[in-house]
Image: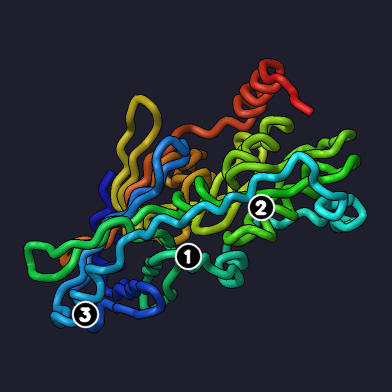
Amino acid sequence: MRYRKELRIMSSNFIHDVKIIIDGVEYTNSNYSISFSIVRKSNGRSSNYALVNINYLTELTKSALRKKVIVPKALNDNTTDENSSEEDLIDTASLDSELEEIQDDSTIQEENQELNTEGHKITIMAGYKTSGKGLIFFGDIERVEENRSGGIEIKATEGEKSWSTEIVNKNYSAGSTTKQIVKNIMESSSYGMGVINCDDFTYTRGFNAQGTLKSELEKLALQVNAEARINKNLIYFVKKGHTELETTVSADTGLKEIRKTDNGYILTMYLNNLLQENMILNIVNYKGETVKTRIDTVSHFYSRLKFETTVECSPYSQQSSKENQTKEENNEELID
């Protein structure tokens, strides 16, 4: 459905505010011609990625940016010797005696996180002069080349390199719990702490974490039917079906179009920096009816003629989510 009347009213209030930060250097839409497309998916089968174009750069700046390609980090041989000393063992008592659940407050997390600075990084923030900018992407620069307009085009992915290569080498003593171990691994990683929201499990014979950050957290997740993933440089260790936040969109918040599909809905709206994958999204249609959905994919676009967010979402059923989780629990083999 189209919201033509609302669009005319809102367009005058939405003054675009965009900032690109590359290795600490800022590029804003006030000083440069910027465009981007960002795709964020909840299935985890492919990386979140961004394609950014910046024009009206000096030759010196373009030359410097073209050199910013990802440099593979050499993996240290951190494998543990079979005769590891007892000093290498992390005792349960040394972990937090009372593990506080990390609250699901993405706004606070994004403000307080210390961003991973390994390699060349790009941060994309977008919003409006009246309501402020929000973080919509933080990742590794994969490719830089000159575009047709004489500027530069940057392709980036969101933190997948370190996620798959960063080494964990820790031994946890008998009696350590999943939440204690996950929290300790999070704190010692190059990522920020996102959310820990899962069932707990006690490792009566201890736990040896020796592998990549991704592989070891996924082993721990398998034990408690959870999933480990990254989002905007934060690690999430959560129950399957976990939803990050809940919000509502309507014509009043910039919703332009609703299209019904076989699997759910495709929404087009003015760029909304609050939306992210796995969020519960309440859609208010032109009749005032509300439909509850779960976000599968979020895409952000910015160019001279477009400043939009496109969302693909599916109907949300809490009961169905619980049933699927129970089936997975019954089919998974526990490991100790």
Could you tell me if residue 242 is visible in this image? Answer: no
Q: CA distance from mark 1 to mark 2?
A: 22 Å
* Residue on which disc 3 sits: 61
Q: 301 or 247, which is in the foreground? A: 301
Please give left or right for residue 206 compared with residue 280 in the image. right
Q: Are marks 3 and 1 in contact (CB under 8 Å)?
A: no
Residue 174 point in image, percent of width and height: 89, 40
Please give left or right for residue 116 compared with residue 202 in the image. left
At a point 32% along the width and 56% down the height, the residue shown is 142
Precedes in sequence: disc 3 or disc 2 = 3
Precedes in sequence: disc 3 or disc 1 = 3
At a point 62% along the width and 58% down the height, the residue shown is 189
Residue 127 point in image, percent of width and height: 38, 70
Residue 97 point in image, percent of width and height: 91, 56
The secondary element bearing badge 1 is classed as: loop
The secondary element bearing badge 2 is classed as: strand
Q: Which circle marks residue 195 in the picture?
A: 2
Question: With respect to residue 286, does 222 lie above or below?
Answer: above
Question: Please, what is the three-letter code of the amino acid marked with disc 2?
Answer: Val
Q: Between label 3 and label 1, give the one nearer the viewer.
A: 1
* Residue on which disc 1 sits: 118
Question: Please, what is the three-letter code of the amino acid marked with disc 1?
Answer: Glu
